[in-house]
């Protein structure tokens, strides 16, 4: 799930499809989610606006998404990584009920599940933790206090037409790398130990099986579908895995996909458990872009009958205009009310123009997490430009691509065409409702792309550490093909790498360049660090990354580090008790960057950096550097691509 308005345009059709299918099998339907049901961004914050009072009871960040799920009758969800973006305290406020003098907020009317998170370790979540393997609705927490909503557990039992289904949740074991976990303990300690993770999940499964439950569904939010596939062969007594976090589209030949989308496998995937029992795995895209539907029959032993899968009815259903026309029911009325209330708040923000673009700006997950993109370059350039206003000596900038949450522009399939290579990518479209004209970039676009709005920091690093950081950035399996949030977007430097070489030894060339694209400092040549490995280089980067997010090996504390927006109030500090990020013994305040043209984000944050940078350079003359194929990229050169060659040290006339 992402935080922009796109989901609000999709959710009404999603609800219509869901209600229509549920009406066909009213006693035999489960409605489940694999997590990431909310994420910081325009929609997330719109729910805290006073105008949301009428649909939420008590406005609050993230609550609009929960209200939508409640209205659609969701029955259980895994805890995804984005549920923890603002920490356990924010999670508790979003899923727990609340009442004040103006009204009451229902909280999540379904349990959130995770077998490998020790949620009770955090005092914010402890009051919501309930016993595992209870029959829904859950009655009380671990201390016997009644729970009407917002419950947390490893598992739950749901009844469907007299049959019991056990539902188990699991969360990526890399959660502490990519979100704010507070005092929650993430297991296993070694996030790469899938045997240990499977054993933890198996314990929750066995608890259900011991009660006689023979139909078990795992809601697994692992971020990469390859991990769910590897877990499948390690688990017993699990019948269905609902994967999550990868946005992988699975579809069969009868499923119509949206323009530009491509399936990477069949819906459902047929796999086998550790004991050789049949198992199914499903996944689809986020933002309510598709509704996944699986109709399956179980035999008398509780085993899946693979032959019961009918591709004419099981599969993914697009929630675009064609999907709306095909729906057999109207959108759920409460869903429409909630969506319109949030859209109204967001609509006002789409009228605040920041800059102009004459090209499509590539920020979709499959693009920005695998290669350099024009939007990634703009964001990194904005980081560098902003940091230099405080310290002109800053040489390079790094942006984790997992924090680029959207593209800017239109994607369309011309009439009469069907192939993905015929899809048209265009500049931003007009929005008559807000007064936005074609080609304009607005506050809403900025908030949609950089939804987390983390603050910028300046970190002095050595040349050796720069190499280590970049090796980490491209050091994962499948780099260039498998999307990963640590993949970098950069400014002030260029590098080439060979993904076929061992991790940690992939960079072939790396150079720091000036504003004209000329080499200012050769750092790596032919795979070897050149010059003094201890020479000082100043980097602009987000506090999330500098604090070790995505596993980046920054020192903690980093002596000489400067937090442009101050150290206080960080969601992911090196130490929750004392976020002294530079080790000087005090909590430093903001550095006092001057307020620019916009005030919707604080100076020194990434949204403000991008807005001010775009307005400075592209308010009159539109940005016009089109996205290029990965083999033609200049800043990040993947030497394994056909036609790619190392041009890091060739003069280019552009950075």
Image (spheres, grey):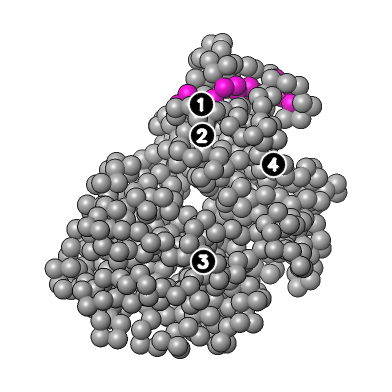
The magenta segment: 504-519
Image coords of residue 331 (percent x, y): 56, 84
Residue assigned mark 2: 474
Classed neighbour count for the residue bearing mark 3: other residues with Cα under 10 Å, few (<14), some (14–19), many (≥20):
some
Element type at marker 3? Answer: loop
Q: Which residue is mark 3?
A: 252
Vertical comparison of 81 with 648: above or below: below
Does residue 175 appear to the left or right of 336 in the view shown? Answer: left
- Distance from the alpha carbon under mark 1 to that under mark 2: 8 Å
Q: Residue at horizontal 60%, vertical 23%? A: 510
Marks 1/4: CA distance?
A: 21 Å
Are the residues flagged by discs 1 and 2 in contact, CB closer than 8 Å?
yes
Q: CA distance from mark 3 to mark 4?
A: 29 Å
Q: Residue at x 65, y 76 (%)?
A: 322
Q: Residue at x 59, y 16 (%)?
A: 525
Give the mark, 3 or 4, whose residue is nearer the N terminus.
3
Kindly check if marks 4 and 2 are in contact, taking CB atoms under 8 A apart as contact.
no
Position of 123 with respect to 67 (left or right) is: left
Mark 1 Cα shell of 10 Å, populated few (<14), some (14-19), many (≥20)? many
Which residue lies at the image location 78% right of the left edge and 42% below the top edge? Answer: 625
SS class, disc 4:
loop
Q: CA distance from mark 1 to mark 3?
A: 37 Å
Q: Secondary structure at mark 1?
A: loop
Can I make out residue 587 in this image? no
Q: Nearer the viewer, residue 492 or 128?
A: 492
- Residue tagged 4: 629
Residue designated by label 1? 506
> Which of the marked residues, 1 or 2, is nearer the chain's N terminus?
2
- Discs 3/4, front: 3
């Amino acid at each position: 799930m992402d935080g922009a308005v796109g989901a609000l345009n999709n959710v009404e059709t999603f609800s219509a499809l869901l209600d229509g299918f549920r009406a066909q099998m009213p006693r035999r339907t489960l409605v489940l989610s694999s997590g990431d049901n909310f994420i910081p961004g325009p929609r997330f914050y719109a729910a805290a606006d006073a105008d949301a009072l009428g649909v939420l009871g008590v406005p609050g960040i993230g609550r609009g998404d929960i209200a939508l799920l409640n209205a659609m009758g969701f029955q259980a969800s895994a805890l995804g990584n984005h549920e923890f973006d603002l920490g356990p305290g924010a999670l508790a406020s979003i899923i727990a009920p609340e009442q004040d003098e103006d009204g009451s907020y229902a909280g999540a009317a379904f349990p959130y599940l995770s077998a490998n998170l020790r949620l009770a370790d955090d005092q914010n979540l402890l009051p919501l933790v309930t016993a595992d393997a209870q029959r829904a609705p859950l009655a009380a927490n671990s201390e016997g206090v009644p729970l009407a909503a917002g419950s947390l557990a490893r598992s739950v039992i749901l009844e469907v037409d007299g049959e019991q289904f056990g539902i188990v949740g699991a969360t990526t074991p890399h959660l502490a790398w990519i979100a704010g976990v507070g005092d929650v303990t993430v297991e296993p300690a070694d996030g790469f130990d899938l045997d240990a993770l499977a054993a933890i999940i198996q314990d929750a499964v066995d608890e259900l099986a011991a009660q006689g439950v023979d139909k078990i569904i795992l809601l697994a939010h692992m971020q990469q579908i390859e991990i769910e596939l590897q877990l499948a062969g390690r688990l017993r007594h699990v019948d269905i895995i609902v994967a999550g976090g990868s946005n992988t589209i699975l579809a069969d030949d009868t499923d119509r996909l949206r323009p530009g989308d491509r399936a990477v496998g069949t819906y459902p995937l047929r796999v086998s458990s550790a004991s050789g029992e049949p198992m199914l795995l499903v996944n689809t895209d986020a933002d309510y872009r598709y509704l996944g539907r699986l109709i399956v029959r179980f035999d008398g032993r509780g085993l899946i009958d693979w032959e019961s899968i009918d591709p004419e009815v099981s599969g993914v259903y697009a929630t675009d205009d064609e999907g709306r026309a095909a729906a057999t029911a109207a959108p759920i009325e409460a869903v429409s009310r909630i969506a319109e209330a949030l859209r109204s708040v967001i609509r006002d923000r789409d009228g605040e123009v920041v800059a102009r673009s004459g090209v499509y700006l590539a920020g979709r997950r499959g693009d920005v997490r695998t290669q350099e993109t024009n939007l990634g370059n703009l964001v990194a350039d904005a980081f560098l430009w902003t940091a230099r206003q405080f310290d002109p000596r800053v040489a390079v900038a790094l942006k984790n691509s997992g924090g680029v949450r959207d593209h800017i522009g239109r994607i369309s399939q011309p009439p009469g065409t069907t192939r993905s290579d015929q899809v048209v990518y265009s500049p931003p479209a007009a929005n008559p409702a807000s007064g936005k004209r074609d080609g304009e970039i607005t506050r809403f676009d900025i908030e949609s792309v950089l939804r987390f709005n983390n603050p910028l920091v300046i970190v002095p690093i050595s040349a050796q550490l720069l190499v280590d950081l970049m090796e980490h950035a491209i050091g994962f399996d499948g780099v260039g093909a498998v999307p990963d949030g640590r993949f970098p977007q950069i400014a002030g430097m260029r590098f080439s790498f060979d993904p076929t070489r061992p991790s940690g030894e992939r960079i072939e060339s790396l150079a720091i360049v000036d504003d004209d694209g000329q080499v200012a400092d050769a750092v790596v040549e032919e795979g070897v660090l050149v010059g003094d490995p201890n020479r000082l280089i100043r980097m602009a980067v987000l506090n999330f990354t500098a604090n070790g997010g995505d596993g980046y090996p920054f020192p903690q504390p980093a002596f000489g580090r400067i937090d442009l927006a101050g150290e206080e109030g960080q969601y992911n500090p090196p130490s929750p008790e004392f976020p002294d990020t530079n080790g000087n013994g005090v909590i430093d305040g903001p550095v006092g960057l001057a307020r620019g043209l916009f005030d919707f984000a604080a100076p020194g944050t990434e949204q403000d950096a991008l807005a001010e940078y775009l307005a400075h350079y592209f308010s009159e003359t539109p940005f016009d550097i089109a996205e290029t194929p990965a083999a033609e990229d200049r800043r990040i050169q993947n030497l394994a691509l056909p036609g790619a060659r190392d041009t890091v040290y060739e003069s280019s006339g552009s950075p």
